[in-house]
Image: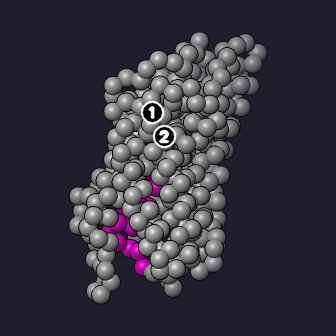
Amino acid sequence: MRVRAASGAPTLPRRAAGYAAAGAMSLYLLVKVVWIALAVRHGTADWVLLNAVTVVMALAGIGLGLALAQPWGMRLPAWLVVPVVWISGGFLVSMLPYLIVSSLLAPSTPEPAGEPGLPAWETVFIGAGFLGMALALVVGLPLYLRDRWPWAFAGRAADRASGRASDGAADRAAVGAGAGARTRWTTVAPAALAVLWTYWAAGGTAGLDPSAPRTEGADARLLLADSALCAVCGVWSLWALNGRGGARTPSWLPMALGFVASGSLFAWGAWKLLWLLPPGVYQPAEYRWLALAEHVVAVGAGLAMVITLVRSTRPASARL
């Protein structure tokens, strides 16, 4: 299948989504700049470093939004665009189920007496930044990816799977068996994580550290359930793209779900590792050794999933 040239002006929906993403992330960036200024003023260097990391991430998000909205975004090298798109979608799009459900629920753990919460404007800006960016990416990212690499979203998943093994009768069984074996091994880690996170979301306590701060509230369980949902979506996407998702499953559905799910495992796993590695910075709810292993596995699973995803959908003649 011939790959369409990456050119042409973006459509109105893509432009609107891109500008909305950049504007929403600008609100989040403003809050972080204020926090850094206050941290410098009060001499809390650890928080300056952490917030500086989030400032860089926010700037990357703003740049991504502008790239979605502008014609020059189609001319950026794939090695620069794909990681930013993948990580941004993993961080934010994967959180939409949690953001929507949690907004409908009353807070399960009120602020302790005597501890001030965030100022109202900061809460509004952070919430609007995350939710606005996530919703804009849901619209803008698929349009950008479809415009730039249309072959990855065309046709049906079953047809792609059969097409990969149709270059010769002698090779068909070997190719199919190899792809199936790779898929099975790639799905082991996310499937195990989905089981673990579902168990904790349902109230299980095995593996949780009794000395750690308690996080049994609805909000913590929703976060775990959201992570488990992403892992399940990733497992299903790989099976579907390997021809086991039903004959009528369109390629774009497992492709999109797998892209977001693998990005979520990698991005959130890496982010939590950044908090865990410095001693004394963050106390996880689970045992520290288990949390480290859990998030290392998540990072590896996300990488393995996206590599398998690209290989399973990329025609031999296509180039990013």
CB under 8 Å between discs 2 and 1: yes
Q: Which residue is mark 1?
A: 68
Image quarter of residue 253: top left
Residue at the far bottom in the pictured view: 114
Q: Quadrant of the N terminus?
A: top right
Image quarter of residue 270: bottom right
Amino acid identity at mark 2? Leu
Magenta residues span 214-231
Residue 280 sits inside the magenta stretch: no
Which residue is at a point 33% across and 25% down the rendered structure image?
A: 12
Image mark for residue 213: none
Q: In this figure, what is the number of numbered marks? A: 2
Q: Is residue 157 among the parts visible in the rendering? A: no
Work out whether 12 lies above or below 307.
above
Determine whether, in the image, residue 104 is placed left or right of residue 201: left
Could you say where residue 257 lies in the image, as x and y percent from the top left? 47, 39
Front-lying residue, 114 or 200: 114
Which residue is at a point 51% across and 27% down the rendered structure image?
A: 72
Q: Is residue 298 among the parts visible in the rendering? A: yes
Disc 1 residue crowd, few under 14, some 14–19, many 20+, Cα 10 Å: many
Q: Which residue is mark 2?
A: 64
Which residue is at a point 60% across and 75% down the rendered structure image?
A: 288
Front-lying residue, 116 or 308: 116
Work out whether 229 lies above or below 206.
above
Could you say where residue 292 lies in the image, as x and y percent from the top left? 63, 67
Image quarter of residue 187: top right
Work out whether 309 lies above or below 117.
above
Amino acid identity at mark 1? Leu
Residue 227 sits inside the magenta stretch: yes
